Amino acid sequence: MAPRAVVVLILWLVTLMSSPIARADSSGPELASYYERHMALLAGVAYGWFGRGAPQRMRDTVVQVGVSQDAYFALLKDGSLLTWSEAPAQAALLMQGVASFAAGRSGWFAIDRAQVLWYGRAAGVAVRRVAADVVAASIGDGADYYVTRDGTLYVKGLAHRGQYGDGRLSATSEFVATAHDAVAVKAHTGHALYLRRDGGVMGTGGNRFGPLSSHGLGDKADSWGRIFDAAATIATGSRHSAAIRADGSLWVWGEGFGVQPKKLLGNVMAVAAGDTATIALTGDGALWQWDGAAGPRRLVPR
């Protein structure tokens, strides 16, 4: 094995055994996509765009980006979590002392520097403490998830599509433990993925278009099933999913790409999935977007 490959493999294993790589709306803090709204973080500058538009400069001194269907989010270097709909200059402060966050349909999660998870819905509305010792979280379209330091995955929300992954099809009023050995979790339209410590990608929920590969294809899976191996990071959109392996190879599956995972690109650092869009950041700093299976086309930030 080449020396560079050995170093990459060691870093991947260390990361999996310590803390998760994936905490944003994508495989990492550099990208975010939710339906048609997208963001990218390049050299500390946050760029945002809609659909097939060009990335526009929005905020400086940013360490993580995120999006919901109606808003942009940015975590600043000083721990301030901001949000805005159109004008970045009119951003509202959501919370301070934030280490990482996730945003989605029902609101947003913030993990503070003490690994306490907080939930909020809008600026000016009091946030609610959810849990302690949290290392990753995700807001789905109807079910929300978080992972604690010991690898336990908790779920609360809609269950009719099998979103809990433990066989139940009825919602609970509180978060319940539904899996173990997790390091990251991603959720979107009625389905969810989580990344195991051993690199396995597990999926549950609605699967009409293949975001869970062949697991429950055509309807839904109501229990977690293994759908991919040797992953370092994961992301999922409304109808397709993605994973990056330790060698930097990007793999995708679902609508537009086919049910079985296929290799799409190499030297990938981060990936995000929206409605039909897939966005990737490569090691040379280039930003790429696929629209369905068409592409990729290189995006030029303005």
Image (cartoon, rainbow, N blue to C red):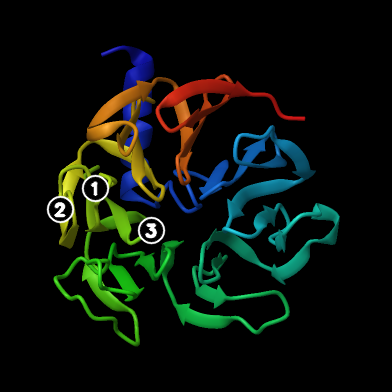
Identify the residue under disc 3: 189
Residue drawn 36% across the image and 23% down it:
264
* Residue 50 tag number: none
| Lower sequence index among marks 1 and 3 | 3
* Displayed quadrant of residue 266: top left
Q: Residue furthest bottom?
A: 173
Task: Give the x, y percent position of residue 142.
Answer: 40, 70
Task: Give the x, y percent position of residue 66.
Answer: 59, 53
Identify the residue under disc 2: 216
Circle 2 residues within 10 Å: few <14, some 14–19, many ≥20: some
Identify the residue under disc 1: 212
Real-space Cα separation, disc 2 to disc 1, in angstroms: 7 Å
Residue drawn 17% across the image and 75% down it:
168
Badge 2 element: loop
Q: Residue furthest top?
A: 2
On screen, residue 38 above or below 179: above
Q: Amino acid at mark 1?
A: Leu
Q: Residue furthest right?
A: 89
- Answer yes or no: do the residues labelled 2 and 1 have beta carbons within 8 Å? yes
Residue drawn 57% across the image and 19% down it:
284
Badge 1 element: loop
Q: Amino acid at mark 2?
A: Gly
